[in-house]
Amino acid sequence: MEILRAEDLTKIYGTGENQVVALDHVSFSVNKGEFLAIIGPSGSGKTTLLRCINLLEIPDSGTVTLNGSSMFFQEGQKVKYSGNEIRNIRMKTGMVFQNFQLFPHKTVLENIMEGPITVLKKDRSECEKEALSLLEKVGLSDKRDAYPGQLSGGQQQRIAIARALAMKPELLLFDEPTSALDPELEVEVLNIIRRLVDEKQTIVIITHKMSFAREVADKVVFFDEGKILKEGTYTELEQSNIPRITQFLNMLN
């Protein structure tokens, strides 16, 4: 069953000589329970792609379909969707950012409960019960009353994952979730993601951890200059004989 389909997505910043094509007619799909890794050089448009999938950025053209709900964008035409329609698509995705983006003035427990209470309008006691269960899942039950500034980077990212899961998303998006962490803390976060993969959570991740992509990903997309150069298993990318991919993988392996 297909959870995500992106078709012909285009995103351009600037005009004239300053124009930058961040996404150049990008198409791919993700099935339920699948783990897709997006790799490629910095500045190639990977983050823009994730932000267009969950409509934090609006594509200039193309189609985003999440579990049967489609949004069509046409170049040169005003966005025809209401804020509520866009929010409904966003609510189907959870996004974990590089820099955590926790609310510094709220406790760990409050951070996890915030979305379900304010967006999903769920009962507070039910939200607290689910938040405590998620804290146990990410191994931080003892930090429920702590504030983000009192936590390590790895702990903050684990809380960010719990917060995303609290919204019960159909698709989880990770934008280089370990890039701001030292190697020891990185392992903590990657182990949480491995468990989510084992539980068949549908995930799209941008990562520079090639060993992780090789071991865990069902599919890997190589992204460069706003385009998908190759999609397949990690082994298929290694054996593709596409010079740009070979150069990139040799540099990181």
Image: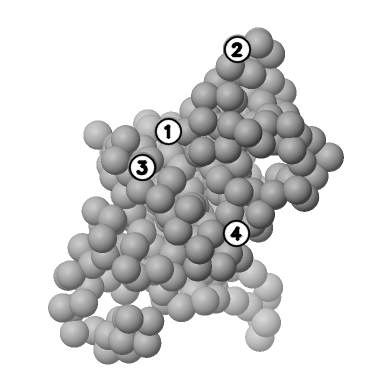
Circle 1 crowding by C-alpha within 10 Å: few under 14, some 14–19, many from 20? some
**Is the residue 167 above or below the residue 243 in the image?**
above
| Relative image position of residue 158 (x, y in whole percent) | 56, 45
| Disc nearest the viewer among 3 and 4 | 3
Dividing the picture into quadrants, the one containing residue 209 is bottom left
Query: If you read the primary sequence from the N terminus, does the residue marked by circle 4 or circle 1 appear first?
Result: 4
- Residue under numbered circle 2: 126
Q: Are marks 3 and 4 in contact (CB under 8 Å)?
A: no
7 or 140: which is nearer to us?
140
> Is 95 left, or right, of 170 in this rendering?
right
Circle 4 crowding by C-alpha within 10 Å: few under 14, some 14–19, many from 20? some
- The amino acid at mark 2 is Glu
- Residue under numbered circle 1: 170
Q: Secondary structure at mark 4?
A: loop
186 or 54: which is nearer to us?
186
Q: Residue at x 41, y 74 (%)?
A: 40
Query: If you read the primary sequence from the N terminus, does the residue marked by circle 1 or circle 2 appear first?
Result: 2
- Residue under numbered circle 3: 195
- The amino acid at mark 1 is Glu
- The amino acid at mark 4 is Gln
**Is the residue 191 above or below the residue 90 in the image?**
below
Q: Secondary structure at mark 3?
A: helix
| Relative image position of residue 57 (x, y in whole percent) | 62, 53
Q: CA distance from mark 3 to mark 1?
A: 16 Å
- Residue under numbered circle 4: 98
67 or 143: which is nearer to us?
143
- The amino acid at mark 3 is Arg
**Is the residue 99 above or below the residue 222 in the image?**
above
